[in-house]
Amino acid sequence: MAPPAQSQRSPSPSQPSGKSEVTDLKTQLRQLAGSRAPGVDDSKRELFKKVISYMTIGIDVSSLFGEMVMCSATSDIVLKKMCYLYVGNYAKGNPELALLTINFLQRDCKDEDPMIRGLALRSLSSLRVENLVEYLVGPLGSGLKDNNSYVRMVAVMGVLKLYHISAATCVDADFPATLKHLMLHDPDTQVVANCLSALQEIWSSEASTSEEASREKETLISKPVIFYLLNRIKEFSEWAQCLLLELVAKYVPADSNEIFDIMNLLEDRLQHANGAVVLATIKVFLQLTLSMADVHQEVYERIKAPLLTLVSSGSPEQSYAVLSHLHLLVLRAPYIFSSDYKHFYCQYNEPSYVKKLKLEMLTAVANETNTYEIVTELCEYAANVDIPIARESIRAVGKIALQQYDVNAIVDRLLQFLEMEKDYVTAEALVLVKDLLRKYPQWSHDCIAVVGNISSKNVQEPKAKAALIWMLGEYSQDMNDAPYILEGLTENWDDEHSAEVRLHLLTAVMKCFFKRPPETQKALGAALAAGLADFHQDVHDRALFYYRLLQYNVSIAERVVNPPKQPVSVFADTHSSEIKDRIFDEFNSLSVVYQKPSYMFTDKEHRGPFEFSDELGNLSIGAEATNDVVRANRVEANDQDLLLSTSEKEESRGASNNGSAYSAPLYDASSVSAAASQAQSDSLISNLEVAGPQASFAIDDLLGLGLPAAPAPPPLKLNSRAVLDPATFQQKWRQLPISVSQEHSLNPQGVAALTAPQALLRHMQSHSIQCIASGGQSPNFKFFFFAQKAEESSIYLVECKINTSSAKAQITIKVDDQNTSQEFSTLFLSALSKFGFP
Amino acid sequence: MLQCIFLLSDSGEVMLEKQLTGHRVDRSICDWFWNQAISQGDSFKQQSVIASPTHYLFQIVREGITFLACTQVEMPPLMAIEFLCRVADVLSDYLEGLNEDLIKDNFVIVYELLDEMIDNGFPLTTEPNILREMISPPNIVSKMLSVVTGNSSNVSDTLPGATSSCVPWRTSDIKYANNEVYVDLVEEMDAIINRDGVLVKCEIYGEVQVNSHITGVPDLTLSFTNPSILDDVRFHPCVRFRPWESHQILSFVPPDGQFKLMSYRVKKLKSIPIYVKPQLTSDAGTCRINLMVGIKNDPGKMIDSITLQFQLPPPILSADLTSNHGVVNILSNKICSWSIDRIPKDRTPSLSGTLAVETGLERLHVFPIFQVGFRIQGVALSGLQIDKLDLKVVPNRLYKGFRALTRAGLYEVRS
């Protein structure tokens, strides 16, 4: 039974409760059924209206089915429509009663009025009762040949509906072939568009079982079809244009002339009043020119104005969706939008999620010429009533400071924030000043003078407190009362609820101790004692570690805790570029609005493992405020050790690439790295159950342990002479889901050998892994590899991004045969790790 | 593709449900939606794309009515949102307004419309002119007609001719005794002025609205004296692309009745019509406020409907405000609104008073942002001017009319 009455929320008094009214209607309908008195249609109409209105508010009126069908013999089209509506709603639940309607619907399908023919056919195909499909085939067949385009249009959709009820019946009746013929020859564009949408659906779902269907699916995106449709695009309705543009975006043109032809044909679509058409066109332009860097650039320039207009015109609902797309493009190509920064200024009335997008865009487009104005604008928001936005804008100022070379003006602004005497402003500013000092130690003098004036009592937020403590430890030689402040904080150890703050306090006291031993000795003793007694595992372990280190050798301890530091040049990116690329491939889809690729939210079964592997890729994912309930707790967990992981990550990373940034001896480094990774592995362990075989592999990788993966995998043999043309690669890459995605550290020899991309290509070739495309300049390289399983057709695709300065490789693997994806990934990584050794 | 469309009243009641595909969407999704809307408040209502545990939802809100569409597959978000906007437009056009009663009284028409507008989850026809020929609106004329003729059907017996014509937005057999065409320039000015009175950003979004009642299939051309000031333009599908590309001339066959011919954007404007001088001084637990409003650059026409609105910052407990002109109101949610209407010749409108600051707070850190509203009839502030409007074949008794209007969009002054 379709909408059951009890599922309705408590009915309001004005709503009839149902039962008695329905019985009442039943008798009334019975009386009218056979009557041919004049005016009977009007009374019927009133009754039908009542029935439909009950149906609409959720009362079950399916018991009237028989009477409704009896009354349906009429020439009045409104009555017919109401009857069709009713039948469509209840037929699925009453298959045996639905049989009663077949008769009159079939008769209506032969009516002389095309409107009635169309409506009847639509209703007939909307019955969705499996054992009635035999009655559908005939009317559909004649509907497709009808001389009225309205009926043909309805019939085409009917074919698709039939396919969903019973695919076999639809294919046996040879409807797909008829649709194909109609698509290429029908004069009415709406019929053509409906054929296209029906065929796309039918052939995509048939393709998995039938060779022929998958070939047909390919022909849909072949040159003749695409160009035939494109030449008629102006006659299509705006919605049909969207559909067609979606199809064109999948087409891979043979040469650049074709690309330009298509773009010329479509250029005026960018000025269409319908935003959906504009966005679909933009997608086509972006996809077509991906391989032509300079044209791609021009495309950005060309689409800029239409996008900005779309944002300012239209309803707020539309602007948000457009803004999300603009956001994606701005982050991809900030320099193109750098002169349009004023468009991203926040207006007072805008909802905060719009402001958040705008803040990110402002941050991205900041460059030498506009920084001053952007920062001035951002400072305005720091006094915003909306506190989360005020925080975001302060963070944005900080991010701009970290990406600019000339930071004079910005540092002053940040320091002004510290003097604003608002808790949250101070808190955010402290965190930023800390990051700033790690990148520009030369500013320490100015910053420390201001930071020294802040009373630690006014700082309550753990992150901010940790930042303050870090600065106290790091610059204790410049701050007169640093040891005493730290001592005061140590005394209140038990009142400090955040483990993160306690961890920082321990380290800071240690650092301070090496710089000003006599003044700090007392605090150090207290801190170590408190730390050893701490309930938190990490705090306890670190205290113990420091304690033993001091016991072992004080001068070595100093070298571990207080090594000379090099300024951080680039902070780890919070959003992996692999994800950004994926979202870009899915331009003009929900992915862009959610800011995550579709496989993360549409494909529920793959959710667990993917989410995990994704997390590995970015341990330091920020406190991105996602609306998604499922991911919320994960983000929170990450948020907690955000500060820790950014400050410690640098150290552990430095350790793994063998002291390029630190001069500490090797044996210290490994222990530091172990301690630092502790926090990270902690969050990983909770995910172990979900992760399965991948996890053990990943943790070993993370901790730098060389344990073999648990089950010895059967050797996977690759075809040494595999071939694949770029178009197929591109197509496959788009189609296949990600099987493995992870970050892998490279050995120093490998990094050293990678002076040019070609070196790695030859190396991988010797392992039967072929390269199809490569590019980039030091320190960032990008490779696309492929391999083929020996004696089988199964193909492996790999995208590998190497950053030589951080010695990391971001690897994404897509495979035909999911069963062997792990083996292949192991094989690939082992090949990669051998790179650089003679 | 869309699977289901719901229309919800402002109390969350499902007024209408239209299933579009074989995958039925249960009504319980509306309960989920409404619970979220209640618990999360306004910020949720403003989100156009929402992920629920089972479906992806698109929503738009018009006149308190929520149009909710559900899908389970990936699709272009803008297509769904645009479509819902069109549904809302068409309904409000048909029912001459949009509210709960109108929809409940005319739900059969709404069903009929949806039936023609979307099939199997894919949008078909949203052109109001074509729909009008398939399903006639329930207005008084047709009601009268049905009484007179006894034919009470509101569905025309013939299929619209336009569905097969090459100008899908127009039927060929339209006849008028008096031919009229009106062109309106309607502009909205967005501006940000900072506390020093410096213009930070100023931009105009404008529309060319046409209302045409002309016999037959007229072919019109419209040109501007200064099209070069336009930054970016978007056209109704009836506008031919080439003449615009080469000569910036709008050449088109208009739909019958009111429609939006073109929309445009003009950026980097230098002059604003109205200034606001806010002065706030705060110490020792109180805050003095003084506001002056006046004309900055005279547009040459009367500026009216001037209003000023601002949100009192949270630490303000109460406000005592007086003005020498117009009416000052403090609404329950601490929004203060001052309606000035026209600026008198003899004095500058000013508002002054004291704000009581929360105890314990010495000075105010957060200052309000003033949102200004105004309307100027007879001028398009972007400077855009219509040169001429020509018809290829001039019918007898043709009347052409031109108007312009500028109003404030997001026009804000910071303090």
Image (cartoon, coloured by chain):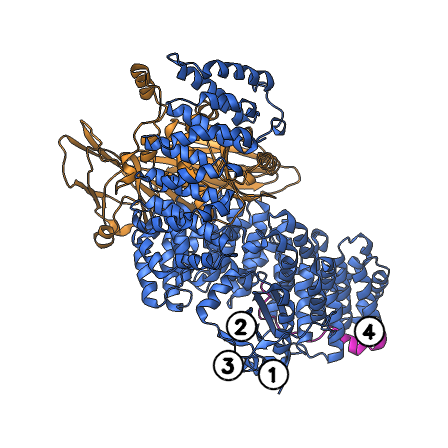
The residue furthest bottom is A838
- Residue type, mark 1 in image: Gly
The x and y percentages for residue B237 are 30, 45
Q: What's the CA distance linking mark 4 and mark 3?
A: 46 Å
Q: Tag 2 or tag 4, which sits nearer the N-term?
A: 4
* Residue placed most toward the observer, B104 or A662: B104
Are callouts 1 and 3 both on one chain?
yes
Residue at numbered disc 1: A836
Please determine if labels 2 and 3 lie on a single subunit.
yes
Residue range highlighted in magenta: A550-573
- Classify residue B142 as left or right of residue A167: left
Q: Amino acid at mark 2?
A: Phe
Question: Looking at the colours in the rendered structure, which chain would you say is drawn in orange?
Answer: B
Residue under the point 59% across and 20% down? A18
Few, some or many C-alpha atoms within 10 Å of disc 2 (few <14, some 14-19, many ≥20)?
many
> Which of the two discs, 4 and 1, labels the residue nearer the N terminus?
4
Q: Given this view, does label 4 or label 2 mark the residue nearer the observer?
A: 2
Q: Residue at x 79, y 66 (%)?
A: A542
User: Mark 2 and mark 4 in contact (Cβ < 8 Å)?
Assistant: no
